[in-house]
Image (cartoon, rainbow, N blue to C red):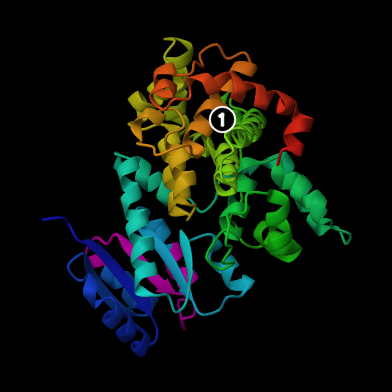
Amino acid sequence: MPVKKRVLFVDDEPKILEGLRRSLWGLRQEWEMAFTLGGEEALKILAQGPFDVVVSDMRMPGMNGAELLEVVRQRYPYLIRIALTGEASRATLLLCAGPAHRFLPKPTEAQTLKATIDHVAELRALLSTETLRKVTSRLASLPSSESLFHELLEELQSPEACLTKVAHFILQDVGMSTKVLHLVNSAFFGMRHTVASIEQAVKLLGLDIIKSLVLTVQVLSLFDEKRLGNFSLNKLWDHSMTVAAYAKQIAKAEKAEPAVVNDAYFSGLLHDVGKLVLAGELPEECGLVRDLTTKDGMAAVDAEQEVLGATHAEVGAYLLGLWGFANPIVEAIAYHHRPQQIPLEGFSAVPAVYVADILARRDAQDTESIVDMNYLEEHSWTDRLAAWHEACCPVGSASERGKAK
């Protein structure tokens, strides 16, 4: 018998809870559900036994939903946290931004709720170790460059703050960029297509939201690069920008659908987010990984697997999956080093990011990076490699990468 998911629903209105109970009655064979009034009662129930998911209304007297989910994040970091709200205001979005993995409008249809919970629950298969799941699930943000953070702050506090300049600062930082893209692609905005452009995301959110994120809502944290020796945020982000531009050009060379081209760019931009998670949360383990690569000559992903039981690819995919990024993007990130492990039907963001990552490293004189020709041959792409590399040549410089966004 498959293990049922344990889901706790929290609201301050008995009629709302009863409506949820009725609409979700058909899922009782798959879920073990509990319904409770208010945050304090929810915490009592959580203390009595393990749950997998907590779904909370945002507007509740006493302890509101954001406060409840923040306590849950601290005490039960492995729980999936979903916020429901009838207010589609951006102020509500900010309240959810830190403690919630997903934000859904209220009312939400039973099938939408089921699909959301099933998807985030399935992500756990990416990470085999409980430690990594806890570390990743509890994250409200990704660490950002301290110098860029202060430059952004100075611009936002200026009476003549400019959206273009704000976007420029955010675009240079993987932590800020990921959080902004997380928010703008949430269910609150109801975008029909994934927003991959930072400039577009900043325009959609607006200066007030960005300012609130930086000044009042602590979803951006600062990163002390000194803790990890030669780890560089700038190097990580520069590589990510290159991979994004290359992946986009490869997808275009294959005359892929616009959605696939967009997914390829987006996935390339965020493909190494897991490195940032590991560097910020597990610096000692990252030191061991670095020793295996520098002293023993082990490939970085193999060293991560040995030390952590997973690689940065799975960690990044797990986090972005929790945060609601689309499946094609999560898959491309999860398998960007090992695309052979996922079955494909036609061209997608997976091979685009895989090859783009290797070409970017090769162009940066990383001799360790070699394309798996057996993989390309299996999908009849062997003869396309030269064309893909040629398509990437015009975007090899930093200035050209900026134009490729």
Reply yes or no: does residue 22 show up in magenta: no
Location of residue 130 in the rendering, given as x and y in whole percent from the top left corner: 30, 43
> Quick check: 162 left or right of 228?
right
| The one of 353 and 296 positioned closer to us in this rendering | 353
Q: Residues within 10 Å of mark 1 (few under 14, many from 20)?
A: few
Residue under label 1, please give it: 227
Residue at 37% across, 85% down: 16
Residue 329 spot, x, y in % from top left: 49, 45
Residue 104 location, x and y as percent? 47, 69
| Left or right relative to 99: residue 310 | left
Residue in the picture at 30% in, 39% down = 129
- At a point 64% along the width and 47% down the height, the residue shown is 177
Position of 248 with respect to 77 (left or right) is right
Does residue 122 appear to the left or right of 241 in the view shown? left
Is residue 399 visible from the viewing direction of this image?
Answer: yes
Relative vertical location of residue 313 with respect to residue 302 in this rendering, above or below: below
Q: Residue furthest bottom?
A: 15
Position of the C terminus, as image quadrant, is top right
Q: Position of residue 79 (x, y in %)?
A: 35, 57
Residue drawn at (72%, 33%) of the image: 401
Say which quarter of the image contains residue 224.
top right
Which residues, given as a range, are shown in magenta? 46-70
Q: Element at badge 1?
A: helix
Q: Is residue 67 magenta?
A: yes
Quadrant assignment for the N terminus: bottom left
Q: Is residue 100 above or below residue 314?
A: below
